[in-house]
Amino acid sequence: DAGVIQSPRHEVTEMGQEVTLRCKPISGHDYLFWYRQTMMRGLELLIYFNNNVPIDDSGMPEDRFSAKMPNASFSTLKIQPSEPRDSAVYFCASSLADVREQYFGPGTRLTVT
Amino acid sequence: RKEVEQDPGPFNVPEGATVAFNCTYSNSASQSFFWYRQDCRKEPKLLMSVYSSGNEDGRFTAQLNRASQYISLLIRDSKLSDSATYTCGSSNTGKLIFGQGTTLQVKP
């Protein structure tokens, strides 16, 4: 299995621009998670899906952030408009069940200038 | 108070030393526990899962104490290649909450 796939790996954009991060979970995994990691706050759960349905988005920082999962093999995290404080590494992870191990993608390193 | 508390370290130990990391969790309903290893500029990778009282894999031992609500990770005979950040997580119905991560530096 190729594991969780994320794109792009690096993104540099200017403040105010729209940013779209993409994720392909491991085939057969029913759960998909989006995390943000910074030095100050560590790994924070933003939102997670079960069978393509958003279950908990309480970690989404504000309305500028949105996530979708149109099918079992694809999810996007969008930031519009982006701000410098959004600079972080964004990880996508997937798991087979809700209390089972999560497997992380390589992450997208976002820099907003 | 954070739901999962972990000493951020750093821990600096010589090769061959035994080192222990501890995490406490506040949600008594947590069902599963995990230890992840993260190398610099890489993604977290699953090191061990802990579903019952403990788990052992070679030089690594994870223990769970539900009464006191803590999990621990013991690394014996540490190697230079063990240098990384080790993060605990507790899971309850889908949400995996992570600790802050503990940085380990093993020195020759």
Image: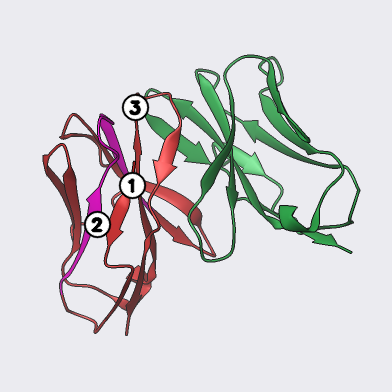
Chain colours: A red, B green
2 or 1: mark nearer the eye: 1
User: In which image quadrant can residue B95 be found?
Assistant: top left
Do callouts 1 and 3 point to residues on the same chain? yes
Disc 3 marks a residue whose amino acid type is: Leu
Disc 2 marks a residue whose amino acid type is: Glu
Q: Disc 3 designates what residue?
A: A96
**What segment is highlighted magenta in the picture?**
A18-35
**Left or right of B27: which side holds B105?**
right
Counting from the top left corner in percent of width and height, residue A35 is at 37, 51
Counting from the top left corner in percent of width and height, residue A20 is at 18, 64
Q: Disc 1 designates what residue?
A: A2
Q: Disc 2 designates what residue?
A: A62
Determine the residue located farthest toward the left in the rendered image: A70
Mark 1 element type: loop
Disc 1 marks a residue whose amino acid type is: Ala
Mark 3 element type: loop
